Amino acid sequence: MVLGQLYRHALLRVAPSRLFCRRLTGGQPRAEASAMNFVHGRKDLPPRSSSTELYDLLNPATGETLCRFPMTSREETGHVIKTAVDAFPAWASVPATERGLVLRRAAALIRERREELAVLEAKDTGKPIYEARIDMDSGWQCLDFFASMTQTMSGQHIPLGTQAFVYTRREPLGVCAGIGAWNFPFQGACWKSAPALACGNTMVFKPSPLAPLTTVCLAELYLEAGLPPGAFCVVQGSVETGEALCNHPAVAKVSCTGSVNTGVQVLKQVAEGLKPVTLELGGKSPLVIFADCDVENSINGALMANFLSQGQGARVVCGGERFVPKEHSLQGGFYMTPCILANCRDEMRVVREEVFGPVMSVLSFDTEDEVVCRANSSSFGLSSGVFTRDLSRAHRVAAALQAGSCYINNFNIFPMEMPVGGYKMSGLGRENGAATIEHYSQLKSVYVELGDVESTL
């Protein structure tokens, strides 16, 4: 019954796929490129050189080339980092509550311009406009949350009898590097920059070259809200640019969202500098649906998680074909119909590896212990979920699943108060929630002696 209802729901959801168009370039680019760096409080194209790679940015919904822009070289990335270094002392000295006011004003600007930002995000990523609007809401909510957190960021007073005490200071790290992904570009930039700026750091952010536009808009809104020039910079680039950010001695921390392979490379790059990292990497999230669940709720939850791969031996229940819209303006886009795979087995590649796109793998199980064991056999541990009316079972399974997040009777909901991050190969550190402050600041302990110092000589 559930499989049949999933089939009917899936046919209603057809969206352009960035996976197809990411390998394609061409077309006639517009004369005015929109994917720019943002440095010194202004937009500017990366300097051109004979070795600079050019990138064609496509709208996956139409196949149209939105713009052509150069990648930022290693040398130019160093200049941008210097800008953030120069901006750091002044921003770090701003009282925390005043930093919070800047974030709150930026959040208000995002709310005001939600629709135009969402339209640009939809063009940039190919996602439906309603999803882009949700991403804008997540962005301003993140800024609002960390604006509030600035009012509670403080150290401790630790008494040591009558003659001494210790107090701690929470201090910023310095220049933080952010490396974003293509599927949530604006949201990801907000999730990384808001806690960094709230703690008094400056940031250089590199969006994915597949979706670089709205991050520049965020930088403009920060500036309009009162953030000093240089406190949030944007560099367009690919691998060389990312390596330059990770390797630079002036960068104090790196936060990256990407594949496991990307995360491993980032760790190697920062190892010599012993820099702290936050890594939000791959996931293969098990969603466990028990027989006593609310069927409609479980279907809606399952449809929130879309996957793409090839399942040899699996049975295609529906979808998976290339789709050509009737609308003429969309016929150059990159579409596929949502696909449900049945008869899947644990050892299949489609079951074990992270995939992107509207494909769902369905597996059956008999007992609670069995399904928990099978779910935990994954090398990933980003997210998980369970649908059941049995409250005891829900909490029991949530405790047993090896994942950074577990949803009970819902899925893929991200309130700003909830820390997000992975177990195992799914990453390090956390984003969102009060726990994030620990990842963008450092504690200094100050010992104060009130009495006489006794010599041991």
Image (spheres, rainbow, N blue to C red):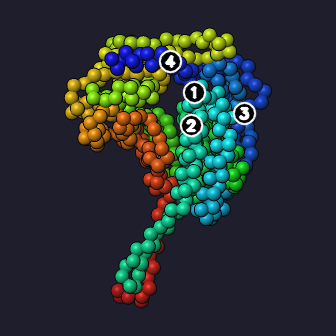
Count neighbours of disc 3 (C-alpha within 10 A) and say few if under 14, some if 14 to 19, many if 20 or more: some
First in residue order: circle 2 vs circle 1:
1
Of badges 4 and 1, nearer the viewer stands 4
Question: Can you see residue 51?
Answer: no
Looking at the image, residue 79 lies above or below residue 447: above
- How far, Cα to Cα, is label 3 from label 2? 20 Å
List the residue tagged with mark 2: 135
Image mark for residue 127: 1
Q: Position of residue 119 (x, y in %)?
A: 66, 31
* Circle 2: element type: helix
List the residue tagged with mark 3: 34
Residue at 21 percent across and 29 percent down: it is 367
Residue at 67 percent across and 25 percent down: it is 56
Residues at badges 2 and 1 in contact (C-beta under 8 Å)?
Answer: yes
List the residue tagged with mark 4: 12
Q: Nearer the viewer, residue 90 or 111?
A: 111
Q: Is residue 33 left or right of residue 409?
A: right
Amino acid type at circle 2 is Asp
